[in-house]
Amino acid sequence: MANFLVFLAAVVAAFLVSSSSADPTAAKVVCYYDSRSYVRETQAKMLPSDLDPALTFCSHLVYGYAGIAADSHKLVSLNENLDLDKGHANYRIITQLKRKFPALKVLLSVGGDADTTEKEKYMTLVESPEARTSFINSAVVILKNYGFDGLDLAWEWPKNKPKKIRGALGSFWHGFKKVFSGDSVVDEKAEEHKAGFAKLVQETKNALRPDNFLLTASVLPNVNSSLFFDTHAIMNSLDFVILDGFDYQTPERNPKEADYTAPLYDLLERNSQHNVNSLVQWWLKNGLPGHKIVLGMPTYARTWKMTSDSEISGVPPLTVDGPAPEGPYTKEAGLLSYAEVCTKLSNPNNQKGIHTHLRKVTDPSKRYGTYAFRVPDDNEEGGMWVSYEDPDTAGNKAGYIRAKALGGIAIHDLSLDDFRGLCSGDKFPLLRAAKYRL
Ligand SMILES: *[C@@H]1O[C@H](CO)[C@@H](O)[C@H](O)[C@H]1NC(C)=O
């Protein structure tokens, strides 16, 4: 018996060493913590102390988001009272989590669609050598002062214009507009910006190298990789690239048409580029080694309002009328956290009237994702269509990453996973499911 316990202890110790050491070939679990969750209320308010149960699963923690000062092009906090030592000192609290989790790498992310004012600054910065230097010098100071391990460039490039999936008349008219007004041009100076960004990446890496800081880039949702990323020029300077293969369809961009927000593979009738596999294949084809690709996965749901005009079957794409009302905790129209979705699903433990529940439709093909919906009542109330990830689809995405030998998964973000364990008792069920299948 005693021998057996010694043996068991040795096995456990070996397992802990292998799973927590910074093995560069091990699949990465890159966990984003969006500090905007700090200002949410009640159940949705996430504090750095709520991160602990997640961090045994994360290889990297990315704190989002810093921004850029439009005049000086310096890297700046977007919420000084929250981030800096003169306020809540979140930057320092976050990097000090490494004391408890020594293998954890903590990065600061800039942009991430959180920096919402004067977005042209992301263009003017890459155009000018002086602006790049100003950004890089300020970034190095912040990384050093606060003990970060690296920087994530989640650059705010202009996004693709949303297009209707259905409607012959609509696409005909769209074709007209394209010819006559050139509205499909995302950025007239895209070539210059692509070259400037490559310089920024190389120059930043040179500045970070003496301290061994990591440098990553994020491709934000609905950004056309081929317009802004010169893969061959940047890949040797980046430790990895995070591909945000989600938000292909959102209630903000596509208020009249609901669809899967983050399908793994292409669907009939859709833009063949609006799926994870197409994005990943583009980067592989353009030379990025698979082990440098980290696939982003959302933890939140996108929600639309179903009306009497909506296809009653719920099969997407379907006609809808804008974002569904806000959730009880996250309080943002068109968005629900995973915890808010799971408490709305029909299940035997759910005591409320059956008509208020969402009906879940799973995807046995494992190619597109899960959705849930509720048709409106006679007064047009309560109709809702929800595209979301659950532990099964998170596991499928991890399975895809494993099958393609990619570098790992990124979780967007921890605050919208079920961090209190309201769904099943386990905290961070999406993160856990992804990690388990990686
Ligand atoms: C991205 O840009 C390329 C041209 O560089 C174009 O062929 C492609 O269709 C664009 N993709 C999307 C999704 O707009």
Image (spheres, rainbow, N blue to C red):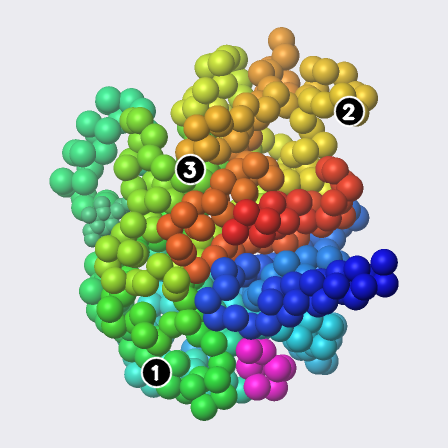
Q: Can residue 120 be seen from the camera position used here?
A: yes
Q: Is residue 145 magenta?
A: yes
Q: Position of residue 56 (x, y in %)?
A: 68, 61
Q: Which mark identifies residue 203?
A: 1
Q: Say which quadrant the N terminus sits in.
A: bottom right
Decide if residue 202 is on the left or right side of residue 180: right
Amino acid type, mark 1: Glu
- Which secondary structure dominates the residues rendered in magenta? helix
Amino acid type, mark 2: Asn
Find residue 329 and report its image quarter: top right
Residue sitting at x 67%, y 26%: 345
Decide if residue 89 is on the left or right side of residue 104: right
Mark 1 or 2, nearer chain start: 1
Residues drawn in magenta? 142-149
Residue sitting at x 53%, y 26%: 362
Secondary element at image label 3: loop
Amino acid type, mark 3: Pro
Decide if residue 162 is on the left or right side of residue 297: left
Q: Position of residue 258 (x, y in %)?
A: 45, 29
Residue sitting at x 38%, y 68%: 122
Label 3 crowding class (10 Å Cα cut-off): few <14, some 14-19, many 20+? many
**In this figure, which residue is indicated by the disc labeled 2?**
350
Task: Looking at the picture, tell me which residue is in the foreground, 101 or 352.
Answer: 101
Q: Position of residue 427 (x, y in %)?
A: 73, 48
Secondary element at image label 1: helix
Residue sitting at x 35%, y 76%: 237
**In this figure, which residue is indicated by the disc labeled 3?**
263
Q: CA distance from mark 1 to mark 3?
A: 35 Å
